[in-house]
Amino acid sequence: MAAFRIVSSQQRSMLASRTPCRYFVTKTKWAYSEETTCLPHLVVALICHRPVACSGTVLARYRYRIYPSPGQGHALARAFGCARVVFNDSLRLREMCHAAGEKITDTEVQRRVITLAKFTEERAWLAEVPSVALVQACNDARRAYRNWFDSLSGKRKGRRIGHPRFRSKRGRQSIRLTPLHGTRLYVAKVGDIRVRWSRELPSVPSSVTVIREPDGRYYASFVVERSAAPLPTCEREVGIDVGLDRLAVTSDGEIIANPRFRRAKERHLARAQRALCRKQKGSANRVKARHRVAVLHRKVREARLDHAHQVALRLVRDNQAVYAEDLAVSGLVRTRLAKSVHDAGWAQLLRLVEEKAVHYGRTFARIGRFEPTSQVCSACGVKDGPKPLSVREWTCAACGTAHDRDVNAARNILAAGRADRLNACGGDVRPGHALAVAGEAGTHRSAA
Ligand SMILES: [Zn+2]
């Protein structure tokens, strides 16, 4: 099997000049066999799986496991610590200035917490780590403070943002660094870190974050521009109703079970956490026990994420449009279902569906959370009034259709999503009549 590589003329010249630059080669998913040169199959593969047209680019994160040597691990630990100190110092400084009623510019903050601090005795060690990590930590603090202020003043939309928290020694540690070139991951004052390039980066990254997870693993997370790869259009559209008993139910009646990954590890977690709390503070055994808890949490997290990726990809690949209910997760997690709600990971699942829909040129839309999806009969549209959650199946009094509660809700979500979408696109559909232009027609149908 000879691997088949696609390179454009520009890329070919890059390769010809033997530039050791991994970002310019795209490895394709299929291989070309020399024994059975099966051209029709290749053509079919081209039609089915390759992008039909390219429209726009989106920013994406690509994460790779990295393996710093023990010495590099120490150097990274110092960098994490210094970035944390700079972040906390600049938050504290802004707070003090705000309390004293004086204005301070961003450059002045940076000058005081980095440049001047390096000359003081108690912050002299700031000079031992990559300065770009410190500047980025300072920028992060500025952004966090700004977001909080904008949220207070109403300039920033969406959920209320709390006061920025001080960074902690415990848990996930990270530093952000600026663009790098070539195939290496070079961190100033740390050196070249070994990276396991599990897949090609789609473009030259604009920034990289070096992360240490609580379980001791290191990762590099690159921000890259990725061009959309639209799939051929298809007819199917689907509404999904997410829940706890069943993770998702589609309007076609397909049921996606809720694997409850955390529930499955509950006993292991409880045992590990019990062991941890019995260990003496500051002891080596406590470190080991904490590591064991972190590993269990990672396993749960990774299993859940992998499952969500698979479900999301299937939904987006099989349907031209996916509609879901806009959820109020923050309200639900204050109930006694909290653990189960977190375990289901609805928000993560819907976020992945949305991202994949953008990437594959499909539509994803959320419908209003106050749409009475479980009260209305999806067959005749008669509103039957609210039903207790225990009612899983019911028969419509008006038309006699037997409904599964979740499938009926999913069908209603599909109908509501379609109606919203047609409203929003209405300006283009009938240009002869249209009084309203497409730009203005995104309002909800009940608002008219
Ligand atoms: Zn009915």
Image (cartoon, grey):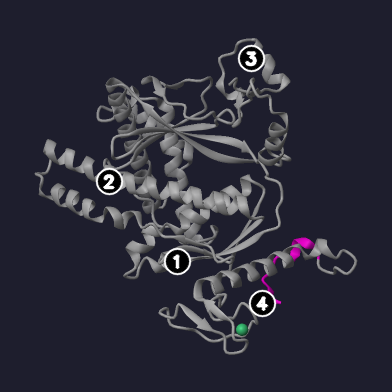
- Using residue 368 as the reference point, say whether residue 255 is left or right of it: left
Can you tell which of label 1 and label 4 is closer to the viewer? 1
Q: Residues within 10 Å of mark 2 (few under 14, many from 20)?
A: some
CA gap between label 3 and label 4 equals: 58 Å
CA gap between label 4 and label 2 equals: 47 Å
Q: Is residue 434 above or below residue 195?
A: below
- Residue at 32% across / 22% down in the picture? 72
What secondary structure is found at the residue carrying circle 1?
Answer: loop
Pick whichever of labels 4 and 2 is earlier in the sequence. 2
State which image quarter holds ligand 1.
bottom right
CA gap between label 3 and label 1 equals: 51 Å
Q: Hey, which residue is sitting farthest right in the picture?
A: 432
Residue interval drawn in magenta = 437-448
> What residue would you read off at disc 4?
446
Q: Residues within 10 Å of mark 4 (few under 14, many from 20)?
A: few
What secondary structure is found at the residue carrying circle 3?
Answer: helix
Q: Is residue 59 above or below residue 321?
A: above
For residue 296, which numbered disc appears in the image? 2
Residue flagged by tag 4: what amino acid is it?
A: Ser
> What residue would you read off at disc 3?
15
For residue 243, which numbered disc appears in the image? 1
- Using residue 296 as the reference point, say whether residue 237 is left or right of it: right
x%, y% of residue 421? 70, 64
Pick whichever of labels 1 and 2 is earlier in the sequence. 1
Q: Residues within 10 Å of mark 3 (few under 14, many from 20)?
A: some
Q: Is residue 111 in view from this perspective?
A: no
